[in-house]
């Protein structure tokens, strides 16, 4: 979760500010600050820090005291055994609980489905979560059901042994049949809630793409990630002048409220115990296909 400090809120102690805005005790905020689960402009701070206008406060795992409850939410499961689970997340579903949003997330559904037999490495709010996709991105995720599997899968992600492919509909016509975007991503200097291509406090980011279909005013792409930065595809496509359609953060071509036209179509990985290579494909959602037809017929 992220909060941006307004002008009229400046010069207040951060523990007091967060206690009021998140409706939690100051002791919980203090504990989170000392655990480096709260950052200001991506930096560690002390509990007595006085917030400034436009400060971006990032809250990672604030409230350990709140018990995350399982909810009987239907899951589109592609694979499951005692170690891993592969699920196809619908658009509009948040992956894990965060301050102010503790219900109706993928984690709530997973807790109910597995009877909380999930890895605990990420903390109570992120049980089982090895990697994430945005709320308004649909598609495949790997879930770890124990800590051993979680550690192995995390290492595989870090060392680029997990293959991921996405489908995106982007604005404008891309003439090249394929390409590689190699541009570092970090926080946007002006709007700290956004990411941007920048040389300042950034990380290497590489996205490969190939054209699947061209329309009069849009292009359908398959994209493969070499790195996994926050909003990577959305930032990279906007950077080259072809933002993802329906992306109200990095683009302007908004068709409806479906969410960005981005789908995690394919995932391939070595099973953490058997080492068998598993791969899965998930079809585009009906809403995604409906918007595609609009561009095919325009």
Image (cartoon, helix red, strand yellow):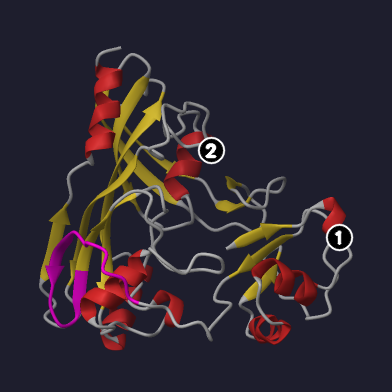
- Is 61 in front, or is 147? 61
Q: Quadrant of the N terminus?
A: bottom right
Q: Residue at x 56, y 69 (%)?
A: 99
Distance between mark 2 and mark 1 Cα atoms: 28 Å
Residue 237, how many percent across, how many down?
45, 37
Query: Residue at label 1?
Result: 10
Q: Quadrant of the C terminus?
A: top left
Residue 250 circle label: 2
Q: Which residues are magenta?
A: 70-85
Q: Is residue 69 left or right of residue 20?
A: left
Residue 272, how many percent across, how many down?
20, 79
Q: Residue at x 54, y 51 (%)?
A: 184
Q: Alpha-carbon neighbours of circle 2 within 10 Å: few (<14), some, or many (≥20)?
A: many
Q: Is residue 200 left or right of residue 148?
A: right
* Mark in the foreground, 2 or 1: 1
Is 46 magenta? The answer is no
Residue 59 higher or lower than 193, as above or below: below
Element at label 2: loop
- Is 1 in front, or is 168? 1
Q: Residue at x 42, y 45 (%)?
A: 233
């Amino acid at each position: 979760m992220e909060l941006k400090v307004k002008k009229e809120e400046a010069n207040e102690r951060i523990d007091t500010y967060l206690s009021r805005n998140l409706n939690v005790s100051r002791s919980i905020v203090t504990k989170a600050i000392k655990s480096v689960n709260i950052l200001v402009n991506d930096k560690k701070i002390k509990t007595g820090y006085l917030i400034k206008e436009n400060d971006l406060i990032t809250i990672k795992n604030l409230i350990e005291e709140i018990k995350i409850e399982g909810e009987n939410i239907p899951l589109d499961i592609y694979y499951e055994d005692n170690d891993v689970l592969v699920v196809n997340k619908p658009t509009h579903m948040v992956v894990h609980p965060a301050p102010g949003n503790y219900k109706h997330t993928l984690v709530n559904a997973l807790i109910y489905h597995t009877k909380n037999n999930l890895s605990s490495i990420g903390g109570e709010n992120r049980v089982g979560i090895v990697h994430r996709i945005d709320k308004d991105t649909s598609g495949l995720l790997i879930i770890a059901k124990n800590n051993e599997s979680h550690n192995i899968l995390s290492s595989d992600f870090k060392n680029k042994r997990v293959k991921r492919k996405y489908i995106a509909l982007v604005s404008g016509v891309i003439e090249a049949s394929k390409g590689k975007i190699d541009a570092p991503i970090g926080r946007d200097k002006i709007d700290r809630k956004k990411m941007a291509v920048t040389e300042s406090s950034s990380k290497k980011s590489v996205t490969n793409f190939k054209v699947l279909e061209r329309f009069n005013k849009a292009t359908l792409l398959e994209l493969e990630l070499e790195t996994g930065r926050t909003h990577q595809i959305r930032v990279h496509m906007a950077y080259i002048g072809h933002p993802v359609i329906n992306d109200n953060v990095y683009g302007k071509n908004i068709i409806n409220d479906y969410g960005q036209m981005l789908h995690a179509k394919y995932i391939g990985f070595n099973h953490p115990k058997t080492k068998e290579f598993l791969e899965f494909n998930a079809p585009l959602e009906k809403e995604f296909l409906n918007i595609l037809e609009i561009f095919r017929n325009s």
